[in-house]
Image (cartoon, grey):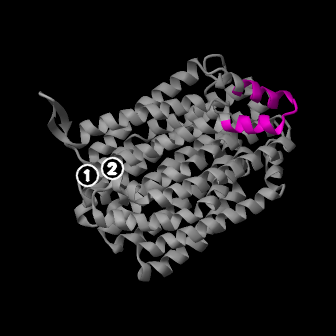
Amino acid sequence: MASTERDSLLTMIRSGESMSLRQQLRLTAVLSWPAIIAQLSTIVMQYIDAAMVGSLGAESSASIGLMATSTWLLWGLCSAVASGFSVQVANRIGASDRKGAEAVLRQSFLPVVIFSVLLALFGIGISGSLPLWLRGGEEIAADASSYFLVFCISLPVLQISFLSGAMLRCSGNTLFPGIVNTGICVLDVIFNALLIFDGHDITLGSTVIHIPGAGLGVTGAAIGTALAEVVAAVVMLWYLWRRNKELNLRDGHGSFLPKRNCMNRAFRISTPLGVEHMLMCGAQVFITAIVAPLGTVAIAANAFAVTAESLCYMPGYGISEAATTLVGQSLGAGREKLARSFAKITVWSGILVMTLMGVVMYVAAPLMMGIISPVAEICALGTEVLRIEAFAEPMFAASIVAYGVFVGAGDTLVPAGMNLGSIWGVRIVLAAILAPTLGLRGVWIAMAIELCFRGAIFLLRLRSDRWLRANRALFASR
């Protein structure tokens, strides 16, 4: 029923039919909730890894925490490359150019796979030294290196999963990626249980059941997640090839070799996103280096608090993905007024949802940290910093969803610069000033101030027409 309603409302965008505010709100909700589920499931996998490894002790927890920003860096670069093609697809579908959309889809696979393989080789090459570069202690370096190595090996598969999911969402199908990502959370639990811990017996009544286990610890967590991602990539690629209605590989007959026009547009969209993500994650790595000297407890508390907070802001990223689809298709159909309307609806929806999530995070912070780690010192410090961050969630939502709006319009260069200026000019400076006296609390106070500043400047850009002018320039000719 939901898919029928979704298709009907999306058809109204492409056909130029007038849409009431109620219909726009309904379409935003129909596209947002599966995307929110998909985003939450991704974080739940990280939460599962953190909780399972956390039971092994503070050092195992810190080894994953130390590598978190580095894995996000490579993860985000794969996502940025996929966006360069998926935004073009959304625009062409909005223009009712299915043949052109499928041509872009086919041309996207070769460049993104090549990119991910090169990125994987780079990561594998530095995996042995990276923990020490991040100022991690000898006691956690080996596990941290092993975790990062497995992650890098799985990058090409992860790239296929990202690309397939992005293409499905930009075609208007946010439901299936949400279902798949929810399913792999279950697989992640199963794989982790078998790979992290040693074999052990459990007693159910009078029956003793032996649970096999590889006892790989931190490395087992990485392998378990990688295996779950393999399943996700295979399933989503199969669906994109055979079953998706609006966009699939089965019906097209074009070449898989990328053409210059398609690559140029992808480069113009992806490059600012990729550079921005590199420098943003570089800033996170820099902050990790600020946190590392504060000790093992601070490293683990910081990493686990970031994971716990993700449960609160991932709904914003889900709505952001819906915003990218709605704005991209509206502009592809030549309906700038409708694009502006969807921009406002999605941004304010994100602010409302994440405000509520911020309240939940403030109240439930001790529970959220307690699930991840049994270490009292880690839980106490993590609870404190989560409650600091809760006050920044509304403006964080504004920046997240507005960014999705701009990506849908192909406006990535200036927003990328805004993100970089905010995190390097505000967060890093304040964190470096506050950490020596306030410890991890100072780092998170700096983060909360910076997120509020970032949200404000993104709202100011949203009020202007500059993001629309960027779209006109990018898609001036087909």
Q: Residue at x 84, y 55 (%)?
A: 465
Q: Which residue is mark 1?
A: 55
Q: Nearer the viewer, residue 78 or 391?
A: 391
Q: Are marks 2 and 1 in contact (CB under 8 Å)?
A: yes
Q: Is residue 359 left or right of residue 136?
A: right
Q: Nearer the viewer, residue 301 or 299?
A: 301
Per the rendered image, the range of residues in magenta is: 6-29
Q: Which residue is mark 2?
A: 51
| Percent coordinates x, y for residue 310 in the rendering | 49, 53
- Secondary structure of the magenta portion, mostly? helix
In the orientation shown, which residue stands out farthest toward the front? 205
Q: Residue at x 58, y 64 (%)?
A: 392
Look at the image and tell me whether residue 322 can be seen: yes
| Percent coordinates x, y for residue 162 in the rendering | 53, 38
Look at the image and tell me whether residue 135 can be seen: no
How far, Cα to Cα, is label 2 from label 1? 6 Å
Please tell me whether mark 1 sits on a helix, a strand or a loop: loop
